[in-house]
Image: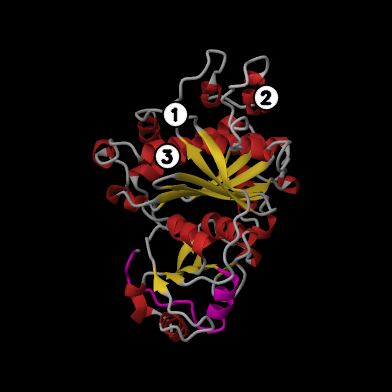
Amino acid sequence: MQSASTSLFHQFPTFRPKFRTLPSRTRPLEFYRPRMASLSDFRVWSQMGQGGSSSSSSPADNGFCSLMEYVGKRGLNVEDDLVVLLYHIQYACKQIASLVASPFNYSLGKRSGLGSAAGSGSDRDAPKPLDIVSNEIILSSLQNSGKVAVMASEENDNPIWISDDGPYVVVTDPLDGSRNIDASIPTGTIFGIYKRLTELDNLPIEEKAMLNSLQSGTRLVAAGYVLYSSATILCTTFGSGTQAFTLDHSTGDFILTNPSIKIPPRGQIYSVNDARYFDWPEGLRRYIDTVRQGKGKYPKKYSARYICSLVADLHRTLMYGGVAMNPRDHLRLVYEANPLSFIVEQAGGRGSDGKSRILSLQPVKLHQRLPLFLGSLEDMEELESYGDVQQKVNPGYEV
């Protein structure tokens, strides 16, 4: 599988933005060299503008702020190693954005022979071909960053040890919602970043890789998701609020479009697959019946909006308020629930398994599943007040 996926990775062109006509002194392609980045890369726009005319094409010159500028010393001022790591993550996500929009996706599975079931006894879902290629893209970028000790991914049974001296641990779902690709429904990438636990350095590689990956969500130093839709949006938090950046395809920059996302304290939308209504516990059915009739604490009727793409459903919930949920033991604590809950909490919302705060849970397995409820604080409090909202009976359906 490894060799097949690697060959597939090279069949796709790397991200190539369409650049506007710029003066000859500017070289925006500096941003897209496939090599380890240094901090000087993130100041290339300002350096290129020195000594030139006032018509410089830097995003800052035009009143815009790029992702790299925002996290740098003139913005959030996050530590240098984390800036470098974020550079490589956003570079990988630009490649994935190009990949999911490629006209060659339709026949990828037939040509590659990929997409086989997960290994015997695995807790993972069977990967799609694009899952495997996206996983390779992210792994390659993390290796090139020189800042990552271990990567834990939905697409690997066990964590991958990358470097003994990498200061960070990255957990990721490389391509959430990949089953929707053929219908052009939005997909996404989810990631969380932890500090490497240096006290584990003397343990065997497999053991320290796993223990580093099973950190509680309260130890996250950063998290994010990238939504691949009509726009490519990177939503991230470093523990001081939640920000959104939109990819400008003309320059290849993620541009700050929302410096402080605040989820409304209450919305008027719930997002769940309510075709499974009769499989739900009594408490969840009563909650849904109540709010959609306008008989809850908010005296307006709620509407259902469900994409069946976790990142897309969450992004809409962040913008408009309400609750996005999967009441089954289906979503993964380590690389889905924890990063997304961190983002939601930093936006003023709540992430819960229906009973407890997600970030307070201690993972015991890499691919551990649980119910997931994310949304507006008042909506979440009302939902949890019904008590019995976790669906414990799975009647055999897959999605």
Residue 140: image location, x then y, percent: 51, 33
Residue that sits furthest to the right in the current view: 199
Could you say whether the residue bearing mark 2 is in a helix, strand or loop? helix
Establish if 294 lies above or below 196.
Answer: below
Check disc 1 and give the amino acid type: Pro
Establish if 19 lies above or below 261.
Answer: above
Residue 115 horizontal side relative to residue 267, left or right: left
User: Relative to the observer, which residue lies in front, 127 or 336?
Assistant: 336
Q: CA distance from mark 1 to mark 2?
A: 21 Å
Q: Earlier in the sequence, mark 3 or mark 1?
A: 1
Picture residue at 64% right of the left edge, 29% below the top: 42
Picture residue at 50% right of the left edge, 58% below the top: 367
Q: Earlier in the sequence, mark 3 or mark 2?
A: 2
Residue 81: image location, x then y, percent: 69, 36
Residue 130: image location, x then y, percent: 36, 43
* Residue 97: numbered disc: 3
> Which contiguous range is marked in magenta?
376-398
User: Relative to the observer, which residue lies in front, 58 or 148?
Assistant: 58
Q: Are marks 3 and 2 in contact (CB under 8 Å)?
A: no
Which residue is denoted by mark 1 in the rendering?
17
* Residue 40: numbered disc: 2
Q: Are marks 3 and 1 in contact (CB under 8 Å)?
A: no
User: Relative to the observer, which residue lies in front, 150 or 355?
Assistant: 355
Q: CA distance from mark 3 to mark 2?
A: 26 Å
Residue 193 horizontal side relative to residue 138, left or right: right
Q: Earlier in the sequence, mark 1 or mark 2?
A: 1
Position of the N terminus by quadrant: top left
